[in-house]
Image: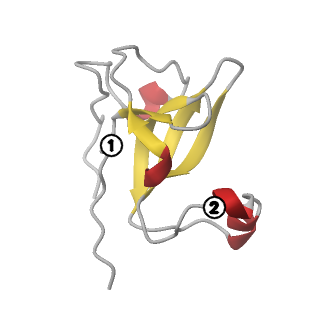
Amino acid sequence: MIRTRAKYHLGQVVRHKKHPFRGVIFDVDPEFANTEEWYEAIPEENRPVKDQPFYHLLAENDQSYYVAYVSEQNLIADYSGEPVEHPDIPDLFGPFTDGAYPLHFQMN
């Protein structure tokens, strides 16, 4: 059994280390839980290890809003104090407060 502790938490604003996007974490997998097809589509030299937390983000960049799946090794905390404008945020979270989004409901 792998014992993994997530570095980031639900509602936290993070940014990608290499790509110009940021987002709000809405779910965490303790280790890789996407498809092999998704994983194989990443160039081999850039593929993250699978035995680390992976985060589901409501993400944004300068052109669009989308859902991203990102390994912990590729994220850093965003301390800009700026909210994320993804249109799905109000469905899951309360208002942006103290640099994060509170959950609307308790997750299991």
Taking 68 as reference, is 82 left or right? Answer: left
Left or right of 92: which side holds 40?
right
Q: Estimate the x, y position of residue 48 in percent, counting from the top left.
A: 56, 61
Q: Is residue 7 left or right of residue 49?
A: left
Q: Quadrant of residue 97?
A: top left
Q: Estimate the x, y position of residue 22 in percent, counting from the top left.
A: 51, 29
Q: Does dot 2 land on a helix, a strand or a loop?
A: loop
Q: Residue at x 33, y 15 (%)?
A: 81
> Which residue is at a point 22% across and 19% down the rendered structure image?
98
Q: Are marks 1 and 2 in contact (CB under 8 Å)?
A: no
Q: Nearer the viewer, residue 49 or 30?
A: 49
Identify the residue at image location x=66%, y=17%. Answer: 62
Q: From the image, state whether disc 1 or disc 2 is nearer to you.
A: 2
Task: Say what amino acid the circle numbered 2 marks.
Answer: Arg
Instruction: Check the image and name the residue furthest to the front.
Output: 45
Please name the residue shown 51% across and 18% down the image. Answer: 85
Q: Which mark is residue 10?
A: 1
Give above or below for 51 relative to 43: below
- Say which label, 1 or 2, has the lower sequence index: 1
Q: Which mark identifies residue 47?
A: 2
Question: Which image quarter holds the N terminus?
Answer: bottom left
Judge whether residue 30 can be spotted in this image.
yes
